[in-house]
Amino acid sequence: MRFTSHLHSRIAMSWVLLVAFILSACGTLIQEAPGGTPTQEASGSAPTQEAPGGTPTQEASGGAPTQEASGGAPTQEASGGAPTQEAFMLRANPARTGVFPSDGPTTISNKLVWYIPQDLAVAGGVVYGRGYDGHFYATDVRTGRELKWSFKPDGAVFGVPTVADGVVYFGSSREGDLRDGRLYALDARTGQEKWSFRTDGAVGFSPAVAGGVVYVESSDGWVYAIDARTGQEKWRFKTGGEVADVPAVADGVVYVGSSDGRLYAIDAKTVQEKWRFEAIGVGFPTIADGVVYVGSELGWIYALDAETGQKKWTFKTDGIVYPFASPVVAGGVVYVGNNDGRLYALDARTGQENWHFQTAEDVIVSAVVEGGTVYLISH
């Protein structure tokens, strides 16, 4: 199953080797890992019906927090733009562009401060993520040791948490039963459960929050829109397979891939399908400047018109583009890696290759762009 393969990718992702290099946005090597080589190269349906929803559970049906946090309240823009420093979302924002709104570090050190091999979110000086004991933790970012609070969900925690408007959102699945999943909303300061929402499948990836709505997938094949304040279901949309994907939201449209080999564009107000695009092993979408960028397990990168779904251009890499290595867009350039160890920089308008950088291992997760610098992990 695609969901299972994604979980395997995520487990491997937890043990990635950080490649000690930083690339400038123009492709110049600043610091290089052994074996890394930059290379300059100039190549060239009808909507489904809504169903009665899952049931939100109000106020602390899970475990109680053990200690109160002292962090500030995170905030998140509702328009799909970049979150503030007090918020965190996988690949920076609901549109999943991968561009973070800061200048990045001013110095680079090879010293490891601390290490947790799990999917984490960082906001307001606090690290949020799961532990090996099944608890969800909030920890001081400076030391990795000072516990703010902990919470015991009813199941295993999956995916990178999202922090927005003072709330931490994450998904789970009951141990041994992928048919029983929940989306949790915890107070970011105290760890108190605000609500949880049950689905009929595992909630395995990072929620998107925009306009007071939480958008999340489930392996039951539905895409859910949940009221961020109350936990009540606003709507659900049925795809043709398991939805083991990270939803992206931009300009009132939700974009999500499914194991049926389709990328869906769903109107967030009418819940009507705007369009669908078919590609084998379609990955996680990124939206920038009216264009949807998405990779596939066959190595293709697609640029689609966000309004119509029509192809603007395609680019073929020399390997597999893993779902977690989905494109990042910054400054008119699309950055994407694959399992041949290359990071490609493509012209966002034409799809022409500007350059590529060769690492020593597979690129299995997306790059991050911050302050004109591209950061990359290889495995």
Image (cartoon, grey):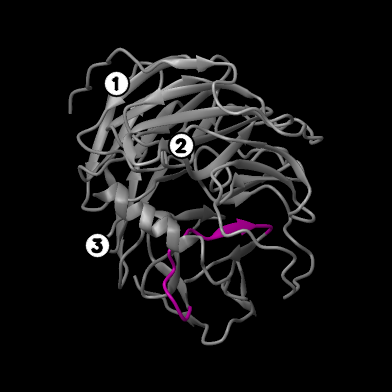
Camera-nearest residue between 156 and 361: 156
In the picture of the structure, the residue carrying the numbered disc 3 is: 298
Mark-to-mark CA distance, 3 and 2: 34 Å
> Where does the magenta region start and end?
359-371
Camera-nearest residue between 22 and 8: 8
Q: Is residue 123 above or below residue 283?
A: above
Q: State the mark number for residue 137.
A: none
Q: Are marks 3 and 2 in contact (CB under 8 Å)?
A: no
Counting residues from the start of the chain, the first of labels 3 and 1 encountered is: 1
Camera-nearest residue between 346 and 190: 190
Please indicate whether residue 89 sits to the left or right of residue 138 in the image: left
Counting residues from the start of the chain, the first of labels 1 and 2 encountered is: 2
In the picture of the structure, the residue carrying the numbered disc 2 is: 155
At which x and y percent is residue 318?
Answer: 30, 73
Counting residues from the start of the chain, the first of labels 3 and 2 encountered is: 2
Magenta segment, prevailing SS (helix, strand or loop): loop
Which residue shows up at 43% across the image and 32% down it?
A: 216
Q: State the mark number for residue 272.
A: 1
Give the crowd class for mark 1: few <14, some 14-19, many >=20 residues within 10 Å: some
Mark 1 or 2: in front is 2
How many dots with numbers?
3
Which residue shows up at 39% across the image and 46% down it?
A: 285
Which residue shows up at 54% across the image and 48% down it?
A: 91
Picture quarter containing residue 306? top left
Q: Is residue 73 above or below residue 194?
A: below
The residue lying furthest to the bottom in this view is: 35
